[in-house]
Image (cartoon, grey):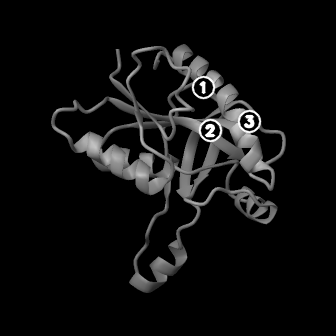
Amino acid sequence: MENVLLVSATAAEAAHLPEGTRVLVTGIGTASCGVELATYLANPDNPLPDRIVNFGTAGALRDGLGGVFEIIEVFQHDFSQEVIEEMTGRPFPNARVLEPATDLPSAVLATGDSFVSDDARRVELARRAELVDMEGYIVARMGAAFGIPVTLIKQVSDRADAEAKTTWAEAVDAGARELARELRRLGWA
């Protein structure tokens, strides 16, 4: 059996996992997630997992999306890649392509530290991605740094629009149930 480390931003998103499931709850956003995950992986008392599975809710950047998706590409949407490349004169890749590991439908994910809840930003991000979250990119980057395969599993909780702040709070429990069901089906919980 594969040694999997489940990673979630919030306890609410992990609330319906079976008792005793090993899950690292990191806190919201790339900084909190990155620090907690790096601290865990660098600790010699913690055996390195065979795979990191980051699961949680995400906003839909396109109408009609619902359910649970596996992410096949993730990028940091609030990072000035072009400016950094211009300043340094070197390419600075800002996307991670992930090897599919499930039979779930796939999507591209935009990650950022700002909660997307306005229509203009939603339309802009939808040109490149279907979903948006606040941790996926840093988990993928951390996995690459430690040489550990990463799978990102995201459940659509809201439309990443003006109503998203209210919608997420109302939808997180149902999303956690759906995520737990899929993680059990996949043999990771």
Q: What type is the residue that disc 3 sits on? A: Glu
**Residue 144, horizontal then vertical, whole percent:** 35, 47
Q: What type is the residue that disc 2 sits on? A: Thr
Query: Up-down: is 87 above or below 58?
Result: below
Q: At 72% across and 34% down in the image, what residue appears?
A: 171
Q: Secondary structure at mark 1?
A: helix
Q: Earlier in the sequence, mark 2 or mark 3?
A: 2
> Which quarter shows the N terminus?
top left
**Residue 156, horizontal then vertical, whole percent:** 70, 37
How far is the residue under mark 2 from the one under mark 3?
Answer: 12 Å
**Residue 69, horizontal then vertical, whole percent:** 64, 34
Q: At 80% across and 50% down in the image, what residue appears?
A: 163
Decide which of 95, 60 is in the foreground and name it.
60
Q: Where residue 179 is drawn, which disc sits there? A: 1
Decide which of 72, 118 is in the foreground and name it.
118
Circles 2 and 1 in contact, beta carbons < 8 Å: yes
Can residue 116 be seen? yes
How far is the residue under mark 2 from the one under mark 1?
Answer: 9 Å
Residue position for label 3: 170
How far is the residue under mark 1 from the one under mark 3?
Answer: 16 Å
Residue position for label 2: 57
Q: Secondary structure at mark 2?
A: strand
Q: At 35% across and 46% down in the image, what residue appears?
A: 36
Decide which of 27, 87 is in the foreground and name it.
27
Can residue 141 be seen? no
Q: Earlier in the sequence, mark 1 or mark 3?
A: 3
Label 1 neighbour load within 10 Å: few <14, some 14-19, many 20+ = many
